[in-house]
Structure formats: structure tokens, C-alpha cells
Image (tube, helix red, strand yellow):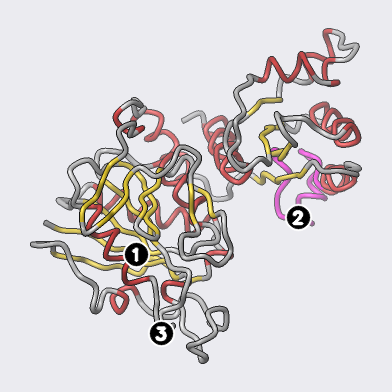
């Protein structure tokens, strides 16, 4: 049984000069092959390692995602039980979601991490890596999952919810599995057993990602008390689609906006005005909620019918607002979903 471990850096590979200060370290220092030293392997497992990247996950970028996607696709096509990816915690949920949208789900791809660097007197990385390797061997495991502190979460809901606790990750519906006394206990309502995976859509998204040299620029805007819309207005003034001069300044035009709205996708009136202008300029907008566990159940039609976007709308105005949609995802995951949509539309894959 072969398991592939891909390293991308992060705290799990971090080193520090003060072993008693968990924050005084540099992420992404130790190669993934070194991280496996002393880690308990599943019985009969042969582990292959590959260093895909070596960075602090706060600096994760689209180019690294492309490379990681390509290497995952390569290895999943081989005779392997699954893949483990070591990753920093800061953007782990984003990478997990991206891979869940672009990789086939017939084998497990497990991301794991650490909240303490490798040089800490009591590092949590080895235990998390041991758990991840164990999870790959489970017959129920498939698709993209995240393992941390003995819990396995699905990529769709998992979020980093604490800045320093060892159990830094949680998901709204609870973990998919819990490891206790070296045994994985799976949730009775495991989503993978209920959801049909659209393999054709996954293949199209993956192809679009791998063929797109420069990914569409999608920004996240926060609705909050006292919001003015000034940030959005500045974005539009500096980067109007088709404005080649502004493209040179920013590298690429603004392709879309994700709004982290309050509550049930409600938006500050001043920000609404700026968003109406953005839509009329041809910039599509995706609205989600800044609430940690989302809970958004409405459709774009509900939003249009129940906010000031609909006020006194004539036919031409309604046509201008067709670029508005609502997402149940967190803002950072909605941004990834939006980019994938835009790449598909641009490439007509």
C-alpha cells in the first residue's frame, strides 16, 4: 500500500530558536521527508514524499495551487491508496476547498498541519501527521479532508476558528470522523455517502485551472457598521475592465467581487450603492455572509427581491444586475468558487 505525502511548508515544518515560544519561529523550514522521521506509519504502508512548496501558508498563491493540483492529479492516477498534504494552518481551509473542487473523489486526499513548530518541546505535527496517514487507509475515506487534533473535517465546511489552540479547526456540521484510541469513529450522517460527486464538473474545473496562466482577480469586500463603499469605489476607479492603462498598474483588471455581508446577506446601504455601480460597470458580484457558520439558504432571486437592489428597478436596471449571485460558502471559499466559475466561462471548457 503506497501513500504519497506532499509537503508545502507551514508551521508543521517550522523551526524556531526559542523552543518555549510557540510564536517565535519561521514556517516552512524542514523538508517533508524529515517530518516523517519518528512518525508511526500504518501497517504495511510504503510512503513516498515530494516537496511541492516550502512556504508560510499566509503567502499561499495561485501558482502553488496549480502545481499542487497537478501533482495530486499525477499521483492519484497511480497505484496509491491516497495522498497526505502537509500545510500551514492560515490558508489550509482555502487549499482544501480548492482541491475538493478540482480533484476526483474516489481516493482520499488528507491535509494536515500543526499549531506548534517542529522545534517546540511538545510539537503537535507528528500526531497530526500520524492521524492523516492513518485516515488515508480507512475504507470510508475518500475526497478531500482536513485532519487536526484527532478530528477529520470535510473540505466544504472546515474553518480555522482559533488562532492558538491545538484544535484550531471546526466545521458547522461537526467532524466527519474522530480518532480515539487509534480507531476512527465516523459520523452517522457522513456527507460523502449522501452527495453525488460531479466528476465531469471537477474535470472541467481542473482543466481550466491548469490551462489558465493568470487567474481572474477577485477581491473580497466586507460589509460592516459605518461602511462607505470607498474601498470598492477605489478598486473600480483603478481597475475598470477593458482599461489597459489600469491593467498595467495593477497587473490585471478586477474580474469579480465577493461581499462578506452581515447576517442573512444584508449589506450596508452605502456599500449597496457602490455594488450597484460595480454591477453596472460589468463587474459580477457574489454575496455571502461573514457569519462563521453561514446559514445562508436564500437564492439570488430572494436577494434581488428583498433588498434595495430591487427598489424602483426598471427592465434595463434588472438586466444590469444579472451578475449578482449568493453563495452559502465562507467569503474566502466563495472567492475560490467565483474564480473557478470565471475561468470556466472565459475558457468555455
Residue sitting at x 40%, y 56%: 68
| Residue 203 position by quadrant | top left
Q: Position of residue 262 (x, y in %)?
A: 75, 36
Q: Which residues are magenta?
A: 239-257
Q: Are marks 2 and 3 in contact (CB under 8 Å)?
A: no
Q: Is residue 118 above or below residue 294?
A: below
Left or right: 54 with respect to 288? left
Q: Residue furthest left?
A: 44
Q: Which mark is residue 250?
A: 2
Query: Does the magenta portion include 248?
Result: yes
Q: Are marks 3 and 1 in contact (CB under 8 Å)?
A: no
Q: Which mark is residue 251?
A: none
Residue sitting at x 33%, y 63%: 6
Label 1: which residue? 128
Q: Which mark is residue 121?
A: 3
CA separation in Å, label 2 and label 3: 44 Å
Disc 1 residue crowd, few under 14, some 14–19, many 20+, Cα 10 Å: many
Q: Position of residue 143 (x, y in %)?
A: 32, 42
For numbered disc 2, what is the local secondary structure?
A: helix
For numbered disc 1, what is the local secondary structure?
A: helix
Residue sitting at x 67%, y 44%: 218
Residue sitting at x 68%, y 41%: 290
**Which of disc 2 and disc 1 is earlier in sequence?**
1
Left or right: 215 with respect to 77? right
CA separation in Å, label 3 and label 1: 16 Å
Amino acid at each position: 500500500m503506497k501513500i504519497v505525502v506532499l509537503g508545502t511548508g507551514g508551521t508543521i515544518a517550522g523551526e524556531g530558536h526559542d523552543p518555549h515560544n510557540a510564536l517565535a519561529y519561521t514556517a516552512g523550514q524542514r523538508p517533508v521527508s524529515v517530518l516523517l522521521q519518528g512518525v508511526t506509519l500504518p501497517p504495511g504502508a510504503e510512503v513516498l514524499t515530494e516537496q511541492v512548496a516550502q512556504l508560510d501558508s499566509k503567502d499561499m498563491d495561485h501558482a502553488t495551487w496549480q502545481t499542487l493540483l497537478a501533482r495530486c492529479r499525477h499521483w492519484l492516477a497511480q497505484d496509491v491508496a491516497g495522498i497526505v498534504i502537509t500545510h500551514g494552518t492560515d490558508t489550509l481551509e482555502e487549499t482544501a476547498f480548492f482541491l475538493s473542487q478540482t480533484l476526483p473523489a474516489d481516493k482520499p486526499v488528507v491535509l494536515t498541519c500543526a499549531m506548534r513548530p517542529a522545534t517546540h518541546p511538545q510539537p503537535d505535527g507528528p500526531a497530526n501527521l500520524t492521524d492523516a496517514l492513518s485516515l488515508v487507509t480507512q475504507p470510508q475515506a475518500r475526497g478531500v479532508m482536513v485532519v487536526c487534533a484527532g478530528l477529520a473535517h470535510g473540505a466544504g465546511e472546515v474553518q480555522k476558528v482559533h488562532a492558538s489552540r491545538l484544535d484550531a479547526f471546526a466545521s458547522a456540521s461537526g467532524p466527519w470522523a474522530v480518532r480515539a484510541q487509534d480507531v476512527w469513529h465516523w459520523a452517522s450522517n457522513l456527507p460523502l455517502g449522501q452527495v453525488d460527486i460531479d466528476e465531469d464538473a471537477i474535470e472541467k474545473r481542473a482543466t481550466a485551472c491548469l490551462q489558465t496562466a493568470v487567474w481572474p482577480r477577485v477581491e473580497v469586500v466586507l460589509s460592516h457598521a459605518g461602511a462607505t463603499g470607498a474601498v470598492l469605489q477605489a478598486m473600480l476607479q483603478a481597475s475598470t475592465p477593458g482599461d489597459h492603462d489600469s491593467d498595467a498598474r495593477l497587473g490585471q483588471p478586477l474580474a469579480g467581487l465577493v461581499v462578506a455581508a452581515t447576517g442573512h446577506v444584508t449589506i450596508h446601504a452605502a456599500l449597496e450603492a457602490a455594488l450597484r455601480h460595480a454591477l453596472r460597470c460589468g463587474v459580477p458580484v457574489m454575496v455571502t455572509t461573514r457569519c462563521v457558520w453561514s446559514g445562508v439558504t436564500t437564492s439570488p432571486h430572494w436577494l434581488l427581491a428583498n433588498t434595495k437592489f430591487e427598489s424602483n428597478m426598471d427592465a434595463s436596471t434588472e438586466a444590469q444586475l444579472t451578475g449578482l449571485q449568493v453563495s452559502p460558502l465562507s467569503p474566502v471559499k466563495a472567492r475560490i468558487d467565483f474564480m473557478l466559475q470565471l475561468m470556466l466561462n472565459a475558457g468555455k471548457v
